Image (cartoon, rainbow, N blue to C red):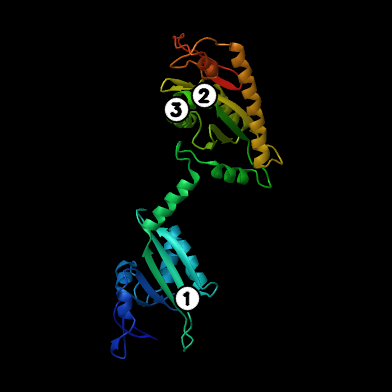
Amino acid sequence: MADDRGTVDRPGRRRTRGRADPWSAAMDALPDRVAVLDRGGRVLAANRSWTLDAGGCRAGASYLEVCDRAARGGDPSAGRLHTALVGVLGGARPSAEVDYPDPTGDRWWRAEIRRLPDDAGGRDRTVVRHLEVTEWVRTREALRTQAVTDPLTGLVNRRVLDDRLGRILGPAGPDQPTALLLADVDHFKAINDVHGHLAGDRCLAQVAQWLRQHTRPQDLICRWGGDEFVVLVQAPGAADVEAVESRLRRWAGGSVAGVPVTLTWGSAHARAGDTPGTLLARADHELRLAKSRRDDRDRGDGLRGRRLAVVPSVGRYPDAVRQGDTSPLPAPRLHSSGDRASVS
């Protein structure tokens, strides 16, 4: 088969007036898959790597048609590559890049498509290069995950929450019932002061696990900061949202290394005109009211003159610590109220 570059003496190799094309050897030396296309997407020249791995698209075949057939067969990567090729070959853009996985998903590749300046004869040329970028993609994904994940609890951080709230509370408002629940670990500073910060870290990690167990996979659980957590709940019906909220509020707490841990809750339901700031502010206001009622109850309980090495109630923790008594207390009992789950 002949073309305007010379003749083909084997797939992907060319001779010009009886001698090897001067840039064929340079192309063959490249480990990446490289081909030169004409204006219509036909392969004019290709190196050895391309000839071996390009799925039968050798010199003279239309790489554009190969991508189009694969795209129509349901390959999304081929569809994106075809779109990029059309844009560069048609002159809409000078270059394009497409990252795509191989069929197993174990390796990643990048297709670089670059249009060359017209030669003296006014002939368009486009270079397509496929190079492996597996390690680069893995590093990029690891960095992305680190940027949005709390390392202690494994929960997402407030970057993800802010993004999700921004999309839910857009100009049109939420398209289904939405509730934001804000939780605070009761007397967390006292846990750190008496048992140490490592014990406090274990408590936070365990709270994250408990929240996962008491929510649905589609609910967003976020470490908002310090000892505060956010659960964002959406469902087609208000009853479904209320069921998740009720389940979380009824949860009676637990124990980590002998230290009982309980939560106090505040919540807000999204309404028309809400922004992320107004929704969070209402939940935070309710949380502060609930914590005030909690503190009033703790003062009323008045557990005086006793201190535990293993404290039966985090809610009574500060008073017990101040008194210095380590005598044992009765076994703890579970109970709950509207905005607080606790162990007594």
Mark sitting earlier along the chain (2/1): 1
Query: Percent position (x, y) of residue 322?
Result: 53, 16
In the rendering, which numbered label is found on residue 115?
A: 1
Query: Percent position (x, y) of residue 134?
Result: 37, 57
Instruction: Decide if residue 19 is on the left or right side of residue 99.
Output: left
Mark sitting earlier along the chain (3/1): 1
Which residue occupies the foreground of this view, 312 or 325?
325
Question: Residue tagged by mark 3?
Answer: 196
Q: Is residue 341 above or below residue 165?
A: above
Instruction: Decide if residue 109 is on the left or right side of residue 253.
Output: left
In the rendering, which numbered label is found on residue 321?
A: none
Question: Residue tagged by mark 2?
Answer: 190
Visible in this render: residue 102?
no
Q: Quadrant of the N terminus?
A: bottom left
Query: Percent position (x, y) of residue 64?
Result: 44, 70
Other residues around mark 2 within 10 Å, as few (<14) / some (14–19) / many (≥20): some
